[in-house]
Each structure stands twice: as C-alpha cells, then as structure tokens.
Amino acid sequence: MSAFNRILLCYDGTREGQHALADGARLAQQLAAQVHVLSVVNNSAWVQGADITSAIPVDMISDSVKSVLDEGLRKLAAKGVHATGHFAIGDPLDQIPHFARELNVDLIVVGHHRAGRLARWWGGRTDGLLLDRVSCSVLVTMGPEIESQAESGIGASGAADPGKTAPQTGHS
C-alpha cells in the first residue's frame, strides 16, 4: 500500500494548474489513489474593492469556479481518473488546508507560477505559507520555464505578460 492514498489536486485552469492536474493524474494512477480536485476563486481582491464586490453576483462567481472545476474533472476522466470535485470562494491559503484536513488527504498537488526575484519580492509572495498550514505532503509541480519580464529586461511597454498566456492544449 502506498503512502499516498488520498490526493488533493488544486486546479485553477491556468497553465500551472493544468500541469499540476496532469502530473497529479499520472501519480494517482500509479498509486491507485483516491483523487479530489479543488478549485478556489480568490476573493482577497474583492475585499480591497468593496464597491466592486456588491456589483458581482455570487451566482456568477460560483458558476465560474464550477466551470473551471468541471473542466478539470473532464480532463481527469479523459485520462481514466475518477475524481470528486470541490469548489470554494476565498483565500487559497485558507481553503486548501481546510479541504486537506476535511478530506484527510495524504498529498496536495499544486502548480507553481515562476516569477522573477523582483516580482516575487515586490508582490509579497506568500506561497511558502501553505507548507506551514498543512500536515500532509505537498507536491509542487513545475511547468515549462518562461522567461519573466523582470529578468528579460522587458518593461511595461505593452509586452504580453507570460503568466497570462493561453493554456497549451498539448498538456492536459
């Protein structure tokens, strides 16, 4: 019996999320693990702009999260992986540990978005805090490396943000 019997795949539809979903699916198949997929919409931006919050119907937000979750579940089913879906609205740093405890998972799989040193410092990234909030293992998957604007010398001259590119269809 493997050490990872229950796996929580965190999926947000981004390229990094798709990579985590694919890697998590392969691992779950090899381990014959029970799979849960969690999609979280981060509401921290709404707290800062309370006027905007009241203008966005909660149903619309829920439908958006559910559609991302359904997409992830369809991708897993296409690979022969049966998974149970969960969605939440809130801070992923709160929601992921909550679901990990509630579902009693052994492993959490998340995708990592690469950022340049300046962007990581300036943005006050708190990615490492997830590790301090869970009592199970965490697998951080790494997607294809993309040169960041800060490291390439490209400024805010209208160049595309590499983190906002369309998901690659070759990696499901």
Image (tube, rainbow, N blue to C red):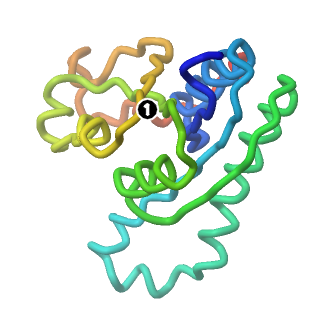
Residue for point 16% across, 24% down: 117
Q: Amino acid at mark 1?
A: Gly
Above-or-below relation of 35 to 40? above
Between 157 and 75, the residue placed more toward the observer is: 75
Residue for point 61% across, 41% down: 13
Q: Residue 39 at what x, y percent from top left?
A: 58, 50
Whether residue 66 sits left or right of residue 130 in the image: it is right
Q: Quadrant of residue 9?
A: top right
Secondary structure, mark 1, is helix
Q: Quadrant of residue 21?
A: top right
User: Residue under circle 1?
Assistant: 163
Q: Quadrant of the C terminus?
A: top right
So how many labels did they put on this image? 1
Residue located farthest toward the front when viewing the structure as drawn: 1
Q: Quadrant of the N terminus?
A: top right
Label 1 neighbour load within 10 Å: few <14, some 14-19, many 20+: some
